[in-house]
Image (spheres, rainbow, N blue to C red):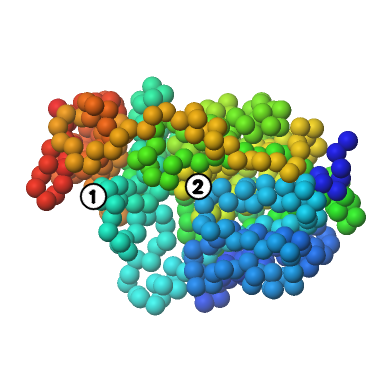
Amino acid sequence: MSDPERTPVIIAVGQVNDRPADPAQGLDPLGLMVAALRACEADAGTALLSDLDSLAVVDQISFREMNPLCGRLAAALGAAPATLEQSDKPHGDTPIRMLNDAANRIGAGEARLCAVAGAEALRTAAQRAAQAAPGTDASYALRRPAKLHREPDYAQAHGLVAPVDVYPLYENATRAAWGQSLAEGQAESGAIWSRMSEVAAGEEGAWIRKPVDAEAILTADAGNRPIAFPYTKLTVANSSVNQGAGFVVASLAEARRRAIAEERLVFVGMGAAAKEPASILARDGFTGSVSMETSIRRTLELNATTGADFAFAELYSCFPCVPKMARRLLDWPLDRPATVFGGLTFGGGPIGNYMSHAVVAMVGKLRGAGGNGFLFANGGFATDNHCIVLSREPLAAAKFPQDYDYQAEADALRGAVPVLDEAYAGPATVESYTVFYARDGQPRGGVVVARTPAGARTLAHVDVADAGMVAFLTDGRSEPVGVSGRIEPRGESGRFWVHG
């Protein structure tokens, strides 16, 4: 029988949305985290925070001048934990890594009570910026930076700057690899996203609580402008939110000492993590992710489970390609919701802290219905992957502390990475592509990732003044991936891909 002193359970969860009419009255990230953790105490029905052994904070970007926040948060809570941590970056996998770390501390006997929290107040930050500079666009939606603070590298010079520029490369490459037409690929995205909107409508903590049907999600119009092909605004993360969330992990023995009701305890299962290379051009391809595959497969194996053993799943949803890849690896049916919170479009996309909200929602689901829940987190540019299992009942296979790092295994499975040829001109085949859109919905640029006859990888611009070229890439009449063309230099404008 496992030792209750070293068995990790989630005993309390809390989250908050902040929608002030006056942005001057809005909570900053510190205030949101305090509110979320106070909500955890209310959820537990007893004081917890002054006794924390560990406090982990997800990095935030909306009020950068406040960083680091971990010490200030502890002081605001009246806590003096032995372990204080703030992540170096706000990647989407961070809350699940911190959950796994908390379980490890408890399993090692190093802690009895651990809290994780994060928050973003990008909506308030944008409103304050707009008041300070009337007439300017202060939207903090996921978009490319107005300018880089250094000379752009090769990928950035071709428009691959922000996540919204990169994920379409996976979307278009996977669609072709799966043998889907554009219409079929979009229909899958619409089905997943419409179900996410339905889940969000029933979640008190979600930001947008209105069901949206698949057709409206996929149809580009003034209210749902195209972002980067084939994504519209309603298929990308909504970061213009003020949200905070947190949770408290304890040893089973500590939970019992504090008289937490047994039916409110959620057991932490084992996790697995792996990453893709930081440079998107140093990856073996865009038709899948060996780090995603390894983290999902290993999590299932570690917990002696299959996809069929889960009542609920949260498959990270910054862009459709991510849950589409993940559900195939988990064998998660299309007709089952891929979220318990509502996804990053409708639940809300507070940069690195979305999965804290997913933990809150998953705990609520498991308390109410029982069973097992699967959490898959992704961050960066489809870079970071971390999965973990939660359950209303103890998982016999779960043992802590554990080494969740499966990087070496993922790297061993990785295919050969193509040589990068930055100056190539001549015949080439499309590996993937996207078209970038301006705020008025008109194409403003695009990029083709191409392979040379020698197998090297190279990039080329798309001439969006060529209506025929844009139509070829976006109208779905034929599949551009795998098509042969050529790359030709055009003076100082760079190298452009030409079909035919």
Look at label 2 and name its amino acid: Gly
Rendered position, 86 above or below 483: below
**Residue under the image location 39 percent in, 77 percent down:** 132
**Residue under the image location 75 percent in, 42 percent down:** 400
Rendered position, 56 above or below 4: below
| Total residue callouts | 2
Residue 116 vs residue 324: left or right? right
Which comes sooner in the sequence, label 2 or label 1? 2
The reply to whether discs 2 and 1 touch (Cβ–Cβ < 8 Å) is: no
Of residues 427 and 417, which is closer to you in this image?
Answer: 417
Residue 185 vs residue 343: left or right? left
Q: Position of residue 300 (x, y in %)?
A: 65, 30
Per the image, the residue denoted by label 1 is 444
Q: Position of residue 97 (x, y in %)?
A: 62, 48
Per the image, the residue denoted by label 2 is 379
Picture quarter with the C terminus: top left
Residue 100 shows in this picture: yes
